[in-house]
Image (tube, helix red, strand yellow):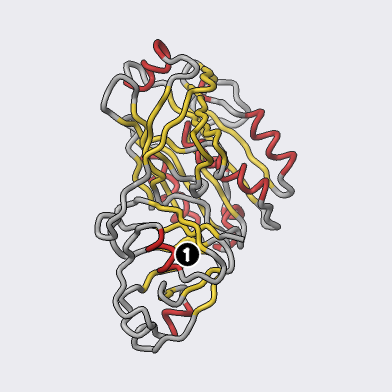
Amino acid sequence: MTYNIALQFEDGVSRIIPCEPNELVADAAYRAKINIPLDCRDGACGTCKCHCESGSFTMGDYIEDALADDEAANGYVLTCQMKPTSDCVVRVPASSAACKTEVGAHGGKLTKIERDSATTVSFALQAERPLAFLPGQYVNLMVPGSKQTRSYSFSSAPNSSELAFLIRDVPDGLMSTYMRKQAQPEDFMMFTGPYGSFYLRPAVRPILMLAGGTGLAPFLSMLHWLKDNPTDHPIRLAYGVNTNDDLVELETLCALKASLPDFDFFSCVVDQASGHPKQGYVTNHLSGDDLHEGNVDVYVCGPPPMVEGVRKWMSGVGVTPKSFHFEKFSSANEAVAA
């Protein structure tokens, strides 16, 4: 069995490499032509110290000067002594350029273009090979006929050659105009990635997902992954949009609810004339109970005002979640994650 090791670099670039069960992560990285900072290779200098955010592993011999006991207890590893026993996410304290690696370049053919609503477009690409990424991550997709790119999160699960995206139809937007007026099945599109630190962490406690508009996309990717990798912990999604036209993928969410043992969701619409049963912002329909007294992982994806609104709501109810991950996006599709 081969494990997937996701190397997360400081500049947001991710590289997912294969590692054999008895192979050192540092050796697997070098085999993939990635130069993780390394000096002694004996667990003595600490140069290759990284943080393992998820996954299991065994560690060989090392000295405390290289890795202190409290660091090891908090997930720090020496990649020259680390052997995975599962898939792992490893944060490398260096840029991808410093490690002499580049973000992956990929391509695929358009297989589906659908206008899900007056304001939203979904499309799918058939890639040349299955693509590994972390559920929630994004790619920079080149707009055909130009040299410009737009950043879009996957709405499909990892490790498939069929890649799905859900994007907002922006008036006069470059990608929107292409999708509306020019795109045809079999068109070839190039993209680079994956990127981003907004991705699903191990499901070890309740999860609260808050999506604004097409910020739903990364949560669809996470939920599709969770369907195949179920958890015993409850998952709740709050999905907010501005108008009824912006509500999409409700059938998909219902299907996911039927297949995930403890998943529930609700939608709400800001427009007071919408007639929707829940009106206003997502935080209008949440309570402190949704934060499980802090024993919860919160994920937020949406425009900057929504992310800041969620921060204020959590402060107002006086509960700090165990972890808080967010991704802000603007009309230019520039993502900022944490």
Which percent across, then down, holds residue 156? 56, 37
Which percent across, then down, holds residue 135? 52, 47
Residue 261 vertical position relative to residue 79 in the rendered view, above or below: above
Residue at x 42% of width, y 24% of height: 188
**Residue 174, quarter of picture:** top left
Task: Give the residue type that dot 1 points to.
Answer: Glu
Which percent across, then down, holds residue 114? 53, 18
Residue at x 55% of width, y 25% of height: 247
- Can residue 319 be seen here? no
Residue nearest the observer in this picture, 130 or 157: 130
Residue 50 vertical position relative to residue 15 in the rendered view, above or below: below
Q: Secondary structure at mark 1?
A: strand
Which percent across, then down, holds residue 329? 37, 38
- Can residue 333 be seen here? yes
Residue at x 29% of width, y 62% of height: 94
> Which quadrant of the figure contains the N terminus?
bottom right
Where does label 1 land, which residue? Answer: 53
Numbered-mark total: 1
> Going by the image, does 291 lie left or right of 187?
right
> Going by the image, does 76 lie left or right of 261?
left
Q: Residues within 10 Å of mark 1 (few under 14, many from 20)?
A: some
Residue at x 45% of width, y 79% of height: 72
Residue 244 vertical position relative to residue 303 in the rendered view, above or below: above
Residue nearest the observer in this picture, 181 or 119: 181
- Residue reaching furthest to the front: 31
